[in-house]
Image (cartoon, grey):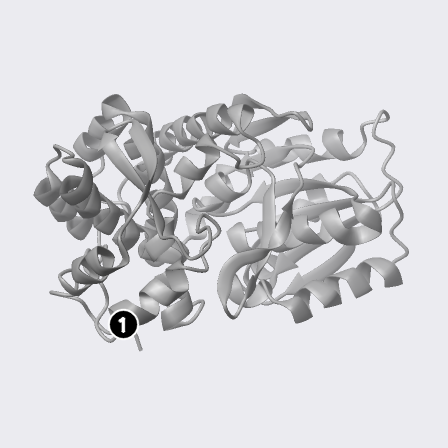
Amino acid sequence: MDQIEIRTNQKTYPVLVGEGVIKALANHISDSAKGYSSVMVITDETVAGLYLPVLKQNAGRQSLYEKIVPSGEAAKTFSVFYDCLTAALENKLDRKSLIIAFGGGAVGDLAGFVASAYMRGIRFIQVPTTILAHDSAVGGKVAINHPLGKNMIGAFHQPEAVIYDLDFLKSLPANELRSGFAEIVKHALISGEPFYNRLKEEVKSLELTALTAMADYLTEGIKVKGRIVAEDERETGVRSFLNFGHTLGHAIEAEIGYGKITHGEAVAIGMVFALRLSCRVNGLVFDLAGFENWLHSLGYQVFLPAGLEADRLVARMKQDKKAVRDTLRFVLLEKLGTPLLAEVDEQELIDALNGFKKGGETFD
């Protein structure tokens, strides 16, 4: 088991990573210093069917309230958020209650936002079940989606702990493996050559990558994020670098329709575009063809999906959280491990997007 400590101005908390670490959940719930009066787990339909009995067995509580929500991005809506608050009220949760976010990134975002809003904020624990959630479960950014933008309604609310049992990853389908690994690649690109070169050299197939190796990559990715969050908890500066690839990625998700492409697969396309833009605008020296070929060999699409219009994507990107007064801003790279936030001319961006369509596929 690895234990990583995340330090923020709000609090310091552990991230436990390893096979079987769900056994530590009971100790965190029964901590006498915390004094939790009641516990409600928010999970989705898929995870509930696979693993909810395992969580209940390891919670160390005879009574555990449950709220089951739709799987994937369908959970991150106003109506589901409202239903979760209703469930908390019906089960008489109070200010000393605990919420457990049990699932992937969407459930973690939703449950964390519910915890942040209920009675002006109660405590919660993240129990991620996907590779993607190694990123979203750490750092305290919780949110739901709006039809006009992803993660636009939310808060900063740090968890009490993150308990990341790798046994839950064994049932992930191929598209979820790709979705999560894209965020690991992001952490590597913004942290420097050693991590990136290691990934590119060692990972030839996501399905065949050993769980022990994946655990090492996840741990390193969490450490990268932890260092940035410690410096900038509320995204007033360097934390925006964690959005590398996300400006276009979020726009793609919104245009195609949430859930029709996984978050990480959209971010992978966004990272390829951001690297192309970095070479074009910043003079980045980087083996872009090698990177694209590597991603393609792992099953990723590396061009803009067909049917998406540049002007509509730009309109979406103007609603990005990094945008200020409609100014288009992208996280780009000067070199591996040296990200920066740069303004990009709108016409130049449209031209670059139009040149990025070749080879794209249509998502039904």
Residue 144 image position (x, y, % from top left): 59, 59
Q: Quadrant of residue 77?
A: bottom right
Is residue 261 visible in the rendered image? The answer is: no
Estimate the x, y position of residue 178 in percent, counting from the top left. 32, 51
Placement of the C terminus among the 4 image quadrants:
bottom left
Residue at 73% in and 31% down: 28
Left or right: 267 in relation to 66? left
Res 159 quadrant in image? top right
Residue at x 60% of width, y 35% of height: 163
Residue 67 picture location, percent across and down: 72, 61
Q: Residue at x 85, y 37 (%)?
A: 36
How many numbered circles are shown? 1
Compared with 142, 251 (above or below) is below
Question: Is residue 10 positioned above or below 244 on the image?
Answer: above
Quadrant location of residue 174?
bottom left
- Provide the residue designation for mark 1: 308
Q: Which element type, helix, strand or loop, lies under badge 1?
A: loop
Instruction: Give the image location of residue 301, x and y in percent.
Output: 21, 58
Residue 61 located left or right of residue 298: right
In this view, the residue in front, 282 or 287, is 282
Mark 1 crowd level (few <14, some 14–19, many ≥20, 10 Å Cα): some
Residue type for callout 1: Leu
Q: Residue furthest front?
A: 325
Would residue 295 be seen by someone viewing this image from the given angle?
Answer: yes
